[in-house]
Image (cartoon, rainbow, N blue to C red):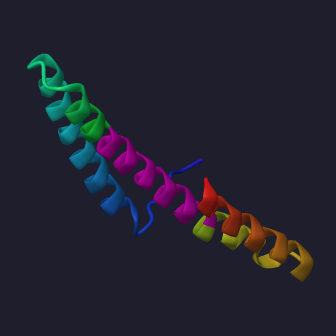
Amino acid sequence: MSAAVHSTHPSIVKRLKRAAGHLQSVIGMIEDGRPCLDLAQQLHAVEKAISEAKKTLIHDHLDHCLGDAAESLPEEQKQSIVEFKAITKYL
């Protein structure tokens, strides 16, 4: 199965690279003995960035891959796909 490249992939890569750099900074903060509150705040920011990248990737997949596959389905089943895509926003 070949990998598809979607329009959101470059922005996801950019976001993940930024998160990776930020994570390296957090590691340095830990090694320098920075306060736990500062560490928790920075780790939360890294976690949020990764989570947003994951959501973008999943929604992109649903929109392109699942949406394309659903084109030939009966209208009732298409509606189920629409509802599934909508509920994933709450992940």
Question: Which quadrant holds residue 14?
Answer: bottom left
Residue 22 percent location from the top left of the image: 20, 40
Q: Residue furthest bottom?
A: 75
Question: Which quadrant holds residue 61?
Answer: bottom right
Which of 35 and 68 lies nearest the eye of the viewer?
35
Which of 13 and 22 lies nearest the eye of the viewer?
22
Residue at 35% x, 56% y: name it.
12
64 w.r.t. 46: above or below: below
Residue 42 percent location from the top left of the image: 25, 39
Question: Which quadrant holds residue 32?
Answer: top left
26 w.r.t. 83: above or below: above
Residue at 31% x, 61% y: name it.
10
Which of 41 and 66 lies nearest the eye of the viewer?
41
What's the magenta region?
A: 44-62
Q: Is residue 9 magenta?
A: no
63 w.r.t. 15: above or below: below
Residue at 44% x, 48% y: name it.
51
31 w.r.t. 72: above or below: above
* Number of dots carrying numbers: 0
Magenta span main SS: helix
Q: Is residue 52 magenta?
A: yes
In this rendering, does residue 73 appear at all? yes
Residue 11 percent location from the top left of the image: 31, 62
Residue 25 percent location from the top left of the image: 14, 34
In this rendering, does residue 4 appear at all? no
Residue at 55% x, 56% y: name it.
58
Horizontal side of residue 39 vs 31, given as left or right: right
Horizontal side of residue 62 vs 40, given as left or right: right
